[in-house]
Image (cartoon, helix red, strand yellow):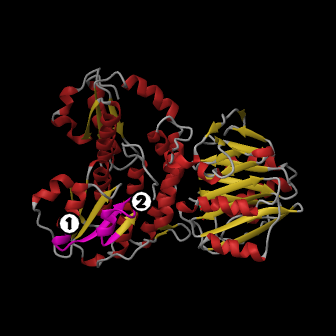
Amino acid sequence: MCGIVGILGQGPVAGSLVDALKRLEYRGYDSAGIATLENGKLARRRAEGKLRNLEALLREQPLNGSVGIGHTRWATHGRPTENNAHPHATDKLAVVHNGIIENFRELRDELIAKGHEFVTQTDTEAVAHLVTEAINHGLSPEQAVAISLPRLKGAFALALLFAGEDNLLIGARRGAPLAVGYGEGGEMYLGSDALALAAFTDTITYLEDGDWVILRRGSAEFRNEANEPVFRAKLKTQASAFLVDKGNYRHFMAKEIHEQPEVVARTLAHYIDFSTGTVRLPFELPFDAKKLTGLTVTACGTAYYAGLVAKYWFERFARLRVEIDVASEFRYREAPLPDEGLMIVVSQSGETADSLASLRYAKAHGQKIVGVVNVPTSTIARESDVAAPTLAGPEIGVASTKAFTCQLTVLAALAVALGRARGVLDAASEQRLVNELMVVPGLLAEALKLETGIEVLAHQLGKATDVLYLGRGTSYPLALEGALKLKEISYIHAEGYAAGELKHGPIALIDEQLPVIVIAPTDPVLEKTVSNLQEVSARGGRI
Ligand code: GLU
């Protein structure tokens, strides 16, 4: 997901829009565009590739409007062409969008049936027509946005500009960040992060998830998801310290947890072509997948648990035997490795010493290396045959959160890609898996809404001295990761177990004092997990 800016200015804003987009370049993008109001009429300039292409276009065909929106796009739906670049527009409005509108197909069909003409492959265009439809029925822009937002599914941020409305911008946030900035003389800004607004102002308000905002010069009116007027505080930011800016959050870890819908969507967009429902790796596999007999995964800590989840996926979707070990063990084991084998090393920093040593051992023993890393310039990235980047952004919190979910995202895409390359996963199954991946950012945003309830639980759990985590299948490594996180952050002793192992020992610990956290999604092993829960509750355990 990329960059959004919006400016309600006093003079021409095109130059400032592009400057702000430049400060968002670090997020990566494949095309860019802006829209302004020229004498009340919408005008757009869009270009493929780098911002200098957009700048060149603007030199030839300048825009002078004093209100506008801009976007750097990281294509998820439709190729990175000029036509698919944002803003997307109708005769009533222009919109820029970060993220994914999951139900765009339904909306598109519905709106086409009502006579709207779609001209791009993007999911975003559905938003433009949806709001336009409401305006065509006589609603004001604000009312039209208010009734349209609840119809959108997924994780996204939006900025909208309306024809004939020289003193209005509307922003909305669900699962992807958005901030309002307050400038001199009533100038107002919208930006997908504080850095985009850094040159204009140091006074900003972060929208809470689900919020939307009506901006006019000198005023910002915030509404929550239920469309109730809400107060959102102004903060002073230190843009220079943006990378260490905690936003609205008390801790970096909390901020990074909340970034997950955005960064997972961003990572997905790097590996998946949503329009065709297929995996599209950003690199060539450096080996013949059909000849692979097995693969070795090595990592430390949380990254190791990501690998352990992926073991289930590589086995199931790519029919590959997986050997996995923590790197601090693997590097000294002198493990025999298969001819023409593959090693996957998972590391957030890409500098984890034991993982690097394991990589070098494997390389010396003829393995091809795929490094799943968050820092593309790291040693592991450089020494791997291919680096598969997670696009989590800087992770400042010591306990890994968003990097973990991004690692899972990349590993899932790799498992599907290997399944296809090995001829063991058919196109229909690939499509089904990709569709399931596509809804993950939206589901993450949903899950984050449980925070208040979880906080209540946390106060109860805080009194415990020990906690047990249980899960089966891919939920088993998640139980291990949950226990690790609890130990690391709360200093409460916790253990993760495969739920089926409960009866082989740990059951002796269960009494009224012991909270048991069970990860039990609706999957083929749910029934079995439920039986384990019965054993726990029979002994008075708190589930
Ligand atoms: N899903 C939208 C598109 O493909 C927005 C992508 C983005 O976040 O830049 O155009």
**Label 2 Cα crowd, 10 Å radius (few <14 / some 14-19 / many 20+):** many
Residue tagged by mark 1?
A: 360
Closer to the camera, 276 or 74? 74
Confirm whether the magenta stretch covers residue 291: no
Tell me the residue at 38%/77% (across/down): 284
Percent across and percent down for residue 148 are: 73, 50
Say if 52 sits above or below 389 in the image: below
> Which portion, as a residue range, is magenta?
362-386
- The alpha-carbon separation of the residues under discs 2 and 1 comes to 21 Å
Q: Report the residue at 52% width, 37% height from top.
A: 249
Question: Residue 252 location in percent, x, y?
Answer: 46, 41
Identify the residue at horizontal 42%, vertical 58% (top origin).
409
Element assignment for label 2:
loop
Q: Nearer the viewer, mark 2 or mark 1?
A: 1
- Residue 138's label in the rendered image is none
Q: In which quarter of the view is residue 527 placed?
A: top left
In this rendering, position of residue 123 left or right of residue 336: right
- Quarter in which the C terminus is drawn: top left
Does residue 190 appear anywhere in the picture?
Answer: yes
What residue is pinned by disc 2? 390
Q: In this view, does 481 lie above or below 271?
A: above
